[in-house]
Amino acid sequence: MRTKRYPERAERTMRSIAVINQKGGVGKTTTTVNLSAALARAGHRVGVIDLDPQAHASIHLGVDPKRPLPTTYDLLTGDVAMADTWREAGPNLSVAPAHIDLAAAESELAGVVGREVILRDKLAQEAERFDYLLIDCPPSLGVLTLNALTAVEDVFLPLQPHFLALHGLSKLMQTVGLVAERLNSRLRMAGVVLCLYDSGTKLASEVSADVAEYFQGLRDRGPVWSNVRLFDSRVRRNIRLAEAPSFGQSIFDYDPSSPGAKDYLALGDEVIAYYAGRDLITQAAA
């Protein structure tokens, strides 16, 4: 299976993306892992930072984060450098694994000055390491998620086309807006990915239209929202995607002929094209 290739950028700039949804079970970690794998298969250098104490992204990529392996817990609460946390997860793909201890970081960092920018500061030395950096955020809006939003430029939102898909999104969008206003002026709401998609149902089509309308309405509210788009690629409900994590493999290693692999390959191509288009717009405006 091959993916499209695009011309190299004249200047290598790391794309940093927080994959976030405060709801669980919507395809957040599945999207982080398999989109990362798709980008790596396209020849891009990709890093995944696991900030979820459940460590599902780490396990999905075949890295069992046992102590005393440096993990993102050590990164946020100790003197560990970002470079010391990376573990190879495949060609062009590295992961900074999480550990269950990360659940205690919220309380341990409560009294730390500048706790929201720890990850940003430690990532400062890693800007040339990767072409794409994806952060798997926990299903909450606490200190861990704030660290991710402060460190990245873009937010990707996986959504299940469920009748409650838009419920609670206003709180998440408010958080993104506040972080952009107070902590990270570079932050942008970039893309929405529909996961667990049942293409044959009327509900999926109706929810897709509602989601598109919701984010279209945000585009006029300022630069944070101006480039947000609902990706055309739909990640269909597929049992092979659910099975792959237990084997410590991306969908491309587990079953490259499955609908899930085809969907994430298409999403990877679309993400690459999205950033290439943004580059052209930036160059034209310069």
Image (cartoon, grey):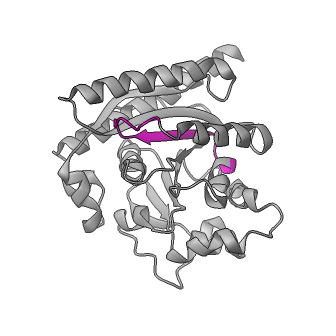
Does residue 1 appear anywhere in the picture? Answer: no
- Residue sitting farthest toward the bottom: 68
Residue drawn at x 43%, y 27% as measured from the top left: 211
Residue drawn at x 20%, y 46% as measured from the top left: 238
Magenta residue span: 150-166
Does residue 188 appear anywhere in the picture? Answer: yes
Left or right for 69, reference 163: right
Dividing the picture into quadrants, the one containing residue 81 is bottom right
Front-lying residue, 146 or 107 = 107
Dividing the picture into quadrants, the one containing residue 258 is top left
* Residue 163 part of the magenta segment: yes
As drawn, 31 above or below 199:
below
Left or right for 245, reference 281: left
Left or right for 95, reference 103: left
Residue drawn at x 63%, y 46% as measured from the top left: 152
As drawn, 192 above or below 246:
above
Percent x, y of residue 264: 31, 41
* Count of all numbered marks drawn on residues in the image: 0
